[in-house]
Image: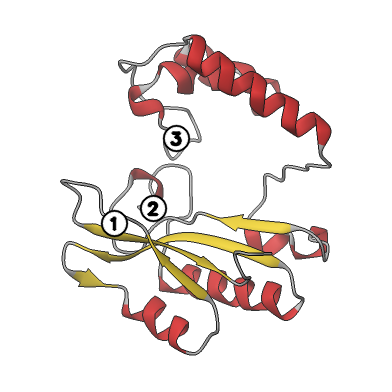
Amino acid sequence: MRNYYNSLKFEDRDPRLLYTLILYGFNQQIRFNSNFDFNNPVGMRWFNDKVLEKLISFSRVIKTKNVQFFNEYFTKISKEIKPNDFVYMDPPYMLTTGSYNDGKRGFEGWSVEHEDQLLKFADKLDSKNIKFMISYVLEHNGEVNQHLKNWLLNRDYSLIRLPTVPGKKRKEVIIINYDCQD
């Protein structure tokens, strides 16, 4: 199925087929090579009642709200964001070595320059009173993302530290620019 999906022209690639590949892929990851071909191997997951329940629930919520999805780099969607929107950002983590941030799998990669763009984007949203949330890693294997830490020192954003996952040597955080009581 993966070979069939990859053999199709980009405009003919059905998102339902991609979703199926993701469901049955290793750890349900989304991974592409430098040719933008889906290349995650088959894993130990399958479609079950819980996945169906989540899919139906998500579909119902989406249909009741004014939701738009954009397949675009975040710096190119500024004009699409309206004052009452909420922007969630989950960028590649600077200190980790995920397959999505090495620049070799159909994506540009993630560098200090990209992180700077993201942080400026967040500041721009804040200056327009647009609520945002960023999920990120502040520390990994004893290394601290000093760049992010320094940026946070000069902002009035809230830093929420997430519980450490046993066996993981990273400290994940959520950064928000609004009061959780809002």
Residue density around tag 1, few if under 14, some if 14–19, many if 20 or more, within 10 Å: some
Identity of the residue furthest to the front in this view: 181
Helix, strand or loop status at disc 1: loop
Q: Amino acid at mark 3?
A: Phe
Q: Which residue is mark 3?
A: 32
Amino acid type, mark 1: Thr
Q: Residue at x 48, y 18 (%)?
A: 21
Q: Quadrant of the C terminus?
A: bottom right
Q: Nearer the viewer, mark 2 or mark 1?
A: 1
Q: Earlier in the sequence, mark 1 or mark 3?
A: 3
Q: Residue at x 70, y 58 (%)?
A: 86
Residue drawn at 39 percent across, 21 percent down: 25
**Residue drawn where x is 45% and y is 33% of the image:** 30
Q: Quadrant of residue 45?
A: top left
Residue 33 figure quarter: top left
Question: Which amino acid lies under the numbered mark 2 shown in the image of this protein?
Answer: Asn
Residue 96: assigned label: 1
Determine whether 78 is above or below 98 in the image: below
Left or right: 95 as drawn, with respect to 106 = left
Label 2 belongs to which residue?
101
- Does residue 53 sit above or below 180 in this rendering? above
User: Pointer 2 and pointer 1: residues touching (CB < 8 Å)?
Assistant: yes
- How many residues crowd mark 3 within 10 Å: few (<14), some (14–19), many (20+)? some
Report whether 76 appears left or right of 88: right
Seen from this angle, which residue lies furthest bottom?
154
Viewer-proximal residue, 13 or 67?
67
Residue 57: give x, y in percent of width and height. Answer: 65, 24
Of callouts 2 and 3, which one flags the residue occurring earlier in the amino acid sequence? 3
* Residue 13 visible, this orientation: no
- Rendering colour mode: secondary structure
